[in-house]
């Protein structure tokens, strides 16, 4: 990477000290979370005793959903995709629209039946272990991918921040250790409390930086001519296929991100329905003050910087800040704030994903084979899982630092995850839904999504529709038609007793 | 009550798909504060969608949860 970024002394010693202090604070919060432990149970460790209040729930949902990807990846995509990437504002809202469909019903069931994971609901509702395992594996793959890509962001940041003094690998290892420590100490309490801090930094960081850069550049209205010059036709209305892809993206995110296991855990962890409802009512507006601002900055970057490569485009906000700081060196603290916001957002996403993976492996994959295991033994298994998984993911992150080919498979995480949506979104409402079609649909949808994404002979988006959405449509067809056609009028469709013991 | 719930979810999904700028076709659209008019539609309709979802969450929580009484206050 050359040009203005190389001249910018990102943080200097005071910035590194600030970040070091921030990491120590996170560990301290982990200790507090450990001391606040009420019981040595999975429910206490993974769900904070199901007692999460409004502010904590809101900010942990926020910090978990918006990661460093929002500040780097989204900005880069907006730079490359221009106004089309405004779809991201709506799709982040659609996640809450998806929660409207299943969260109220799932929350009530979780209170009645003691769910800790999505797998608990699926097993309780359908009573078929292979289905639960399949759904859990899809969640684990998606989360592992999510952690890996976010660790990569952190590694590159640390290397950049320290001017190469701390290598990518060392940065990944150090931050992974901090995350695993406060998580092992305090479980969801520690994770959620650190999310409060991280959410505040993320929210205010984005707002302040956006306002500063708007004032510095004059905003899009002032840069329209320059944008047109750099990218002729940038304002053109999307074509028919592009509109279909837009709709496909909305559906993919609606069904995919809403199924993130760590988000479902937060639904379970809410103190009560009123708390959950209010948090979601506020969350639905957050994309307007987060995603929209970042997308606007990406498009602004396209007006200021022509012909950036894909990798360079993901640093557009930093480049805009570098311009600003060159004119006003006293505003270097904005860069520190921005880097801190990325670190905060990324760490909050990693710690939540890590905890969710641990709970899934323990509850959905381990406990069924050891039904007599005590809560203490399960807790140890969960912590051991976190440690082992984090070690593997850190190793893979370092190994795959520059790998591009593996990323193609990794990028299909949402296309896999959305295959769980019919089982959950329909399962909480539709009593006639049959287990066989649900399992067949999930498997068929997964295979179709993988096939379309993996085979180079098939376009990545046939007819403008994502492979995962094709899979989801097939999945739904099998579920609905299969459930209607399968005749079993005497089948008991009331929820079974939880068979996780 | 099942049907009402279906209408609620289908309606919210329909609102979501209406945020796509389906009906815009101009090659050189006019600009609003630097955003092409179809992008302004996407932003404005997203705001409407958010308001609708927030409203539905407040008014129809019990219906969405599968309760027969949609006016019942959520359990504390």
Image: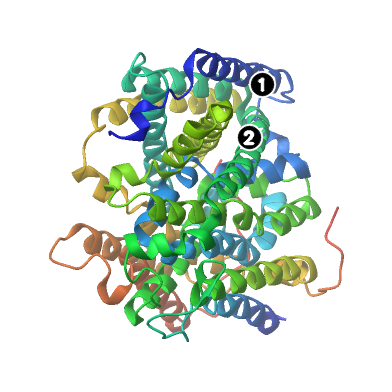
Task: Give the image location of residue A313, x and y in percent.
Answer: 34, 46
Discs 2/1, front: 2
- Dot 1 lies on which element? helix
Quarter of the N terminus of chain A within the rendering:
top left
The residue labelled by disc 1 is A29
Lateral position of residue A136 relative to residue B46, left or right = left
- How busy is the neighbourhood of tag 1: few (under 14 within 10 Å), some, or many (20 plus)? many
Residue A165 visible from this viewpoint: yes
- How busy is the neighbourhood of tag 2: few (under 14 within 10 Å), some, or many (20 plus)? many
What separation in Å lies between label 2 and label 1 (alpha carbons)? Answer: 16 Å
Q: Residue at x 60, y 41 (%)?
A: A63
**Which residue is outermost to the front?**
A327
The residue labelled by disc 2 is A201
What chain letter is assigned to the residue under label 2?
A
A287 or A420: which is nearer to us? A287
Q: Residue at x 40, y 56 (%)?
A: A303
Q: Residue at x 70, y 19 (%)?
A: A32
């Amino acid at each position: 990477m050359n040009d203005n970024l190389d001249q910018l002394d990102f943080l200097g010693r005071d910035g590194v000290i600030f970040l070091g202090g921030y990491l120590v604070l996170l560990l301290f919060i982990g200790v507090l979370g450990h001391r606040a432990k009420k019981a040595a149970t999975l429910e206490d460790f993974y769900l904070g005793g199901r007692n999460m209040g409004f502010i904590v729930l809101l900010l942990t949902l926020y910090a978990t959903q918006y990661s460093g990807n929002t500040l780097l990846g989204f900005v880069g995509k907006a730079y490359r995709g221009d106004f089309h990437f405004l779809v991201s504002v709506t799709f982040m809202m659609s996640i809450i629209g998806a929660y409207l469909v299943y969260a109220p019903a799932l929350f009530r069931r979780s209170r009645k039946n003691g769910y800790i994971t999505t797998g608990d609901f699926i097993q309780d509702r359908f009573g078929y272990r292979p289905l639960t395992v399949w759904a859990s594996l899809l969640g684990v793959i998606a989360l592992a991918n999510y952690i890996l890509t976010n660790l990569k962001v952190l590694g590159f940041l640390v290397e950049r921040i320290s001017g190469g003094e701390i290598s990518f690998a060392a940065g990944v290892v150090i931050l992974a250790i901090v995350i695993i420590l406060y998580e092992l100490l305090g479980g969801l309490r520690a994770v959620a409390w650190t999310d409060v801090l991280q959410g505040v930094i993320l929210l205010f960081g984005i707002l302040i930086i956006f306002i500063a850069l708007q004032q510095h550049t004059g905003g899009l209205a002032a840069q329209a001519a320059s944008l047109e010059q750099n990218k002729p036709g940038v304002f053109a209305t999307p074509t028919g296929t592009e509109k279909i892809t837009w709709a496909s993206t909305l559906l993919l995110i609606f069904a995919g991100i809403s199924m993130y296991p760590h988000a479902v855990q937060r639904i379970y962890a809410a103190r009560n329905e009123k708390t959950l409802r209010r948090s979601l009512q506020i969350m639905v507006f957050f994309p307007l003050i987060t995603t929209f601002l970042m997308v606007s900055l990406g498009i602004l970057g396209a007006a200021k910087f022509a012909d950036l490569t894909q990798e360079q485009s993901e640093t557009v906000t930093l480049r805009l800040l570098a311009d600003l700081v060159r004119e006003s060196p006293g505003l270097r603290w904005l860069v520190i704030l921005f880097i801190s916001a990325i670190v905060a957002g990324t760490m909050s996403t990693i710690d939540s994903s890590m905890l969710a993976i641990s709970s899934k492996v323990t509850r959905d994959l381990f406990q069924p084979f050891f039904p007599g295991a005590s809560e203490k033994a399960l807790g140890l298994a969960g912590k051991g899982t976190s440690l082992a998984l984090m070690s593997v993911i850190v190793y893979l992150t370092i190994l795959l630092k520059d790998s591009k080919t593996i990323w193609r498979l990794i990028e299909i995480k949402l296309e896999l995850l959305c295959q769980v949506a019919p089982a959950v979104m329909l399962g909480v409402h539709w009593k006639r839904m049959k287990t066989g079609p649900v399992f067949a649909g999930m498997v068929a949808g997964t295979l179709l999504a993988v096939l379309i994404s993996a085979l180079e002979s098939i376009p990545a988006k046939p007819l403008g529709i994502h492979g995962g959405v094709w899979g989801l449509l097939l999945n739904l067809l099998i579920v609905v038609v299969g459930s209607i056609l399968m005749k079993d009028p005497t089948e008991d469709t009331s929820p079974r007793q939880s068979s996780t013991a | 009550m099942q049907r009402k719930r279906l209408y609620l979810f289908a309606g919210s999904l329909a609102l979501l798909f209406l945020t796509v700028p389906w009906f815009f076709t101009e090659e050189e659209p006019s600009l609003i504060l630097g955003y092409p008019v179809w992008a302004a539609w996407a932003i404005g309709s997203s705001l409407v969608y958010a308001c609708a979802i927030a409203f539905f969450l407040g008014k129809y929580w019990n219906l969405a949860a599968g309760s027969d009484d949609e006016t019942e206050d959520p359990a504390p």
